[in-house]
Image: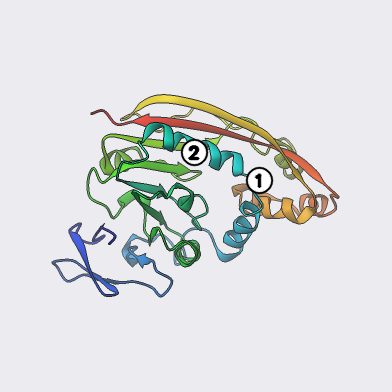
Amino acid sequence: MPQYLCPLCQTPLNQSDKTFRCVNNHCFDLAKEGYVNLLPVQHKKSKQPGDNKAMVRARREFLEQGFYQPLIDKLTALQRHYLPVNQAYNLLDAGCGEGYYTHQHKTENNHVYGVDIAKEAVKIAAKKYRNCHFSVGTLSQLPFANDFFSWVVSIYAPILDAEFNRVLSSGGYLITVTPAENHLHELKAVIYQQAQQHDMEKSPISSLELIAQERLNYQMDFANSQQVLDLLAMTPFAFKASNEGLAKLKALPSFSCQADFDIRVYKKPQ
């Protein structure tokens, strides 16, 4: 049974049938898809925060074609390396989206949670990956107790040092995935007049020890323009694409660009 904290009073939620309830009688219902919405109205900054349906659909189409499979292989290899396969532990995908990465971390012995602010994405995740626990929530106030997770992964999501540190157990690990210098550079060159490299110098984590850092770079080859448009739709610079840039992408018979990831492993002191 999943273990959550009430987002209103930070006391434990107890599940009875399809309702989560705290001692102060705050109630949250389990949706038919299998997720629980722990994002109160007062914690929202907009009516529908996070990715919209079109962005979620595009990301799903793109990821299911395996273009980021090398990244998944690297992340699950790190998980096996640092955590014993027979060890029971809790794992969090912070900013899980539609759950494509989340379920890849599930083993026989762990309990996997995915949290995202985008309700449409979480709905898809919970419906498809029944062996994980999904909730709608904000990363700035995670609905979990202190020291609850042994493993937290953040893939292209906001990295919140203090909150991740709070929910990590002693000796626990945080894995972050951010764009390296040349990530999607060829795609950006079509969209922007002058494509800039990503800045890799920033490090939002200061409370944890950086114990490993790896660069994962490879070429992605696209057979048609729709695959490229799906990739564009799941990126922040989709909103800045001009009509001229979109026309260029639609006219492409094929396209190649780099995937370039910066992967960092942090550890919480014992």
The tag on residue 75 is 2
Mark 2: amino acid: Leu
Location of residue 255 (image quadrant): top right
Location of residue 9 (image quadrant): bottom left
Where is residue 159? Give x, y as percent. 41, 41
Mark 1: amino acid: Phe
Residue drawn 47% across the image and 29% down it: 202
Residue drawn 60% across the image and 44% down it: 69
| Side (left or right) of 131 relative to 208 | right
Question: Secondary structure beneath disc 1?
Answer: loop
The tag on residue 67 is 1
Q: Front-most of 28 and 236? A: 28
Is 162 drawn above or below residue 240 in the view shown?
above
Give the quadrant of the N terminus: bottom left
Question: Secondary structure beneath disc 2?
Answer: helix
Count of numbered circles in the view: 2
Residue drawn 63% across the image and 47% down it: 237
Where is residue 192? Give x, y as percent. 72, 41
| Side (left or right) of 221 relative to 179 | right
Colouring style: rainbow
Give the quadrant of the C terminus: top left
Is 153 drawn above or below residue 201 in the view shown?
below
Count neighbours of disc 1 (C-alpha within 10 A) and say few if under 14, some if 14 to 19, many if 20 or more.
Answer: some
Q: Earlier in the sequence, mark 2 or mark 1?
A: 1
Where is residue 199? Give x, y as percent. 56, 30
Where is residue 114? Give x, y as percent. 40, 54
Q: Front-most of 1 and 165? A: 1
The CA distance from mark 2 to mark 1 is 15 Å
Count neighbours of disc 2 (C-alpha within 10 A) and say few if under 14, some if 14 to 19, many if 20 or more.
Answer: many
Q: Front-most of 62 and 27? A: 62
